[in-house]
Image: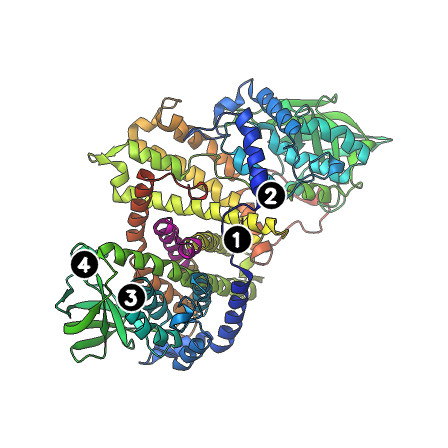
Amino acid sequence: MDFTDSFDEAEYRAKCRRFLDATLPRRHPGHVRGYRRGEDGPDVVPQAKAFQRKKFDAGFAGITWPKEWHGQAGTPVQQMIYDQEEAKYDTTVNAIGLQLNICMPTICRWGTQEQRDRFAPPALRGEEVWCQFYSEPSGGSDLGSLRTRATRDGDEWVINGQKIWTSLAHEADWGVLIARSDFDKPKHEGLTFFYLSTKTPGVEIRQIKQMSGASHFNEVFFKDARIPDSQRLGPVDGGWKVAMSLLMGERYSLDDDFGPSFKELFSLTRQLELNGRPAFEDGGVQDRLADFYVKAQGLRFTRYRIMTSLARGEAPGPEASIGKLVAATMIQDAASYGLELLGAAGAEMGADMPLEGIFEESFLDSPAFRIAGGTDEILRNTIGERVLGLPPDLRADKGMPFKAIPVGSK
Amino acid sequence: MNFDFPDEFKQLRDTAREFLVERCPPAATRKALERADKVDRVLWREIGEMGWLSAAIPEAYGGLGLGHLAVCVLAEEMGRVIAPVPYASSVYMATEALLLYGTEEQKKSYLPRLATGQAVGTLAFVEKAGPLNPASFDTRFLDGRLTGTKLVVPDGDVADFAIVAVRSLEEAPSLCIVDLGDAAVSKMVRPTVDPSRGHATIRFEGVPAEPLPQANGATAFQSLIDRAAVMMAFEQLGVATAALEMARDYAKSRYAFGRPIGSFQAIKHKLVEVYIATELARSNCYWAAWALESESSELAVAAAASRIASCDAGWTATRENIQTHGGMGFTWEMDCHLYYRRARLQALALGSAREWKRKLLGALWARESAATPTDYAA
């Protein structure tokens, strides 16, 4: 039992560090990647694209993708090592990286070699940005109840309907789309999967202002938008399987650096006074800090367990499923506790607040983590059913033709 | 990166699980609950013969010399079956104290008997309600004699000897070893929240005792407790996991409103929260096992984290196991309470989570003020 890298791992880590040191500033304490409103600014996506290009040139784009996908044919452990190292630097690459890692494997897995050659290189170089046209006003957690209609017309499909919560659509060049091609079949059996340019006539993208004030996601309207049949992925009415293969592309290495955690709270309690003493010395404060620490360490060492499985060429155990569920609430709770410690002064926002104002920012931003990429409730269903083997919930719409199912808000 | 138990210890775990499931079903623990003699002596002899009591004892003293990772593996299995044997007292506490602080002569005298199970040892340290504070112990060791009273001594009803924590001046030994068969020792068996284990109040009235000469000052006592806490965290993890599995199995087979109750999200989501608590505990336990085995300077921090996480998992899992079983879960006849009792007993045994949270933050503070933390522990 040890934490040391193997010779190959150490060599790879050193290679990552050399690249990152030469490319990015180190993240200073308290500065948390990905939470800042600043990421919404006009230069964020250009910066992310420029960094993606450098990653590509240095051989760190598509680390685990096979050569046919224009990837590096590396190992999941190499990906984890790279992610661990990148997390120590100040980067906004996630502005495009997440969508890249979800959309492009789907294109490559279901598309032809010609399609891989056309789309993978520019995506890996950061030249083309992708998004997913998935959730709809009538179905988010219950994605299978989507209503956007795909009607066959010769060699083309005509798309009508509306998508929502489409992250990055306003910056994207391309998107993957799931739409309903048959309303008479049960809900998961009448869906077809496509990709299309966001510049396709009949596609209108409107940014949504989030509760945090930022606008990362969009609502997207399709009005007689035409897609050639050659841009269909998978069989007609077989789109659910394609979509599910996309959601399976889990990121094992999701770190806990998306908001404040123990480190930020520890630092804050050393700056603040409580009853004339550093807040850190207060028993009640120590109780709470210990809980955050133990949870954060639990997640950290769970990742090491996952990495160990991957290093042996084994699939990670079921513990790999808990990371996002635990981290999302932990971040929200840590933001809240930071504000509680700041007291009346904590209401003020800004970079000159303690820890660069992370607690106030994250208070407004962190609700997103518990919803995006699978809500807490859906994840609990998944873990309960797949890991614990508990029976599935009753489905009131099971086997019904889609057109007979009540959907959306009534 | 190899953050896992070596294969030979996984085999040991499989062997132990197979043996204990067969040999120590909950009915065995239930017997201990309902009778005066709390020890399954046949089981104790058998695990002694298999070397489970001596995994961390070097071969020179009659042990297997497998190290502490083996003890951690076995502890989890003992917890899964809530075994009615003085494993924690004799192995994590008495054996560990002798390994750490015993003289060569003391090791030669005690360890071979502990290794076979012929002798049972324990640790006597509690004196009053509230947080443990070695600096305020009233028990004194003077001129070779021990005087004082210790409460809730684990397995104090059956132990042959005890390591006793005493008030010590700087640099003076804080632990001594006492034969509990001495005429000046009086034991009063006391009921506890978990009657499947025996406990006693023990009064020492000028009992002849030997110091563990290397156990200098209060920090020596603390180091011993840290090490015992890691091994007990694994036992606690075993209790929690077993309780989760019991609740899960019941939720799959019990029907209400025409459906298995595990299909209801109120039950399903709750059991997922229990699962999360056990996994976070497991990861903290693995870290602590590594720190123990490698004599890392992280041990104080990791031991506290493993204890806090495993006690939380033990509480969450055993509490919700009763709740999932409904009215049946509250009966004497159902096994749920065996786990509920054991999890709490262990959560109190080395001091409560509240105290360990203080210790954790103290240790983090000390680390922060001293060396740069290592990457993985940051």
Q: Position of residue B154 (x, y in %)?
A: 29, 69
Q: Which residue is mark 4?
A: B172
Q: Earlier in the sequence, mark 4 or mark 1?
A: 4
Compared with residue B222, is residue B62 higher up or lower down, i.e. above or below? below
Marks 2 and 4, Cα distance to the nearest angstrom?
50 Å
The residue range painted magenta reads B289-314
**Labels 1, 2: front one:** 2
Kindly identify the amino acid type of the residue bearing the numbered disc 3.
Gly
Q: Which residue is mark 3?
A: B102
- Compare residues B54 and B74 and report the one nearer the observer: B54
Q: Which residue is mark 2?
A: A8
The residue tagged with tag 1: helix, strand or loop? helix
Kindly identify the amino acid type of the residue bearing the numbered disc 4.
Ala
Where on the picture, by quarter, is residue A286?
Answer: top left
Q: Are marks 3 and 4 in contact (CB under 8 Å)?
A: no
Q: Position of residue A97 (x, y in %)?
A: 61, 31
Where on the picture, by quarter, is residue A110?
Answer: top right
**Labels 1, 3: front one:** 3
Q: Are the residues flagged by discs 1 and 2 from a single subunit?
A: no
Residue B265's tag is 1
- Compare residues A299 and B267 and report the one nearer the observer: A299
